[in-house]
Image (cartoon, rainbow, N blue to C red):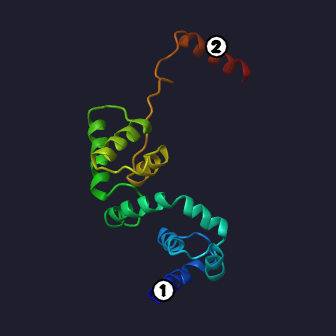
Amino acid sequence: MEEISEIEKLFEDCLPEAKNKIKKYSIDLKLKVLKLLDLNVSMHKIEDRLGINRKTIREWRDKKNLFLDINAKSVRYRCNRVKGLNTIFSEEEELKIKLWIIECRKQLCPISTKSLVAYASKMKEDFNIKHINVKLRWAYRFLKRYGFSIRRITHLGQFIPRLHSEIKKKFIENIISER
């Protein structure tokens, strides 16, 4: 009897989110559905009660370890993330990366997005973050978030051509002749 009440309670917890028109399910819902499967509730019954396709439930079952890992480690990010922003680092960690960029620029060291990703990956290891990869997309969002831009070294237009006086003379003659 007690087991049945736990199953019913899980169904009641899942129902509001599962019946939502937008079919993007939270990790919490996925874990509750997986718990129902652990309690030997059939996929047909879950599909009937919650309206979640069996194929989707099977995919969740196959990725169960990934969901458990993400859920366990995401608790850290729920409290430490930069408020309102979707980032993998906390405010303190992003501030350290920001100060690193400022320090490198003071020393006239060029910073590319690849070097930023490499430094952030090193920081990720220092802060013991294992389940998220730092990618270029994160670097571009980070730069935009803090108002940085990538400065590129250019060699165009820095030197006057050797024959500039001759080119200038021909240009002036061409202008005068067309008048």
Q: Read off the residue under disc 2.
A: 170
Does residue 86 appear anywhere in the picture? no
User: In which quarter of the view is residue 86 placed?
Assistant: bottom left
- Check the image and report above or below for 127 versus 72: above
The picture places residue 66, in percent across and down from the top left corner, at 47, 57
The picture places residue 135, in percent across and down from the top left corner, at 46, 45
Q: Nearer the viewer, residue 96 or 28?
A: 28
Rounded to the nearest angstrom, the CA distance separating label 1 from label 2 is 89 Å
Quadrant including the C terminus: top right
Which labelled disc corresponds to residue 137? Answer: none
Q: Earlier in the sequence, mark 1 or mark 2?
A: 1
Which residue is painted at 55% across and 63% down in the image?
61
**Residue at disc 1, secondary structure:** helix
For marks 1 and 2, give the one nearer the viewer: 1
Classify residue 71 as left or right of residue 41. left
Q: Read off the residue under disc 1.
A: 9
Q: Amino acid at mark 2?
A: Lys
Neighbours of disc 2 within 10 Å: few (<14), some (14-19), many (20+):
few
Q: Nearer the viewer, residue 105 or 139?
A: 139
Q: Amino acid at mark 1?
A: Lys
The picture places residue 85, in percent across and down from the top left corner, at 41, 62
Neighbours of disc 1 within 10 Å: few (<14), some (14-19), many (20+):
few
Which residue is painted at 44% across and 88% down in the image?
2
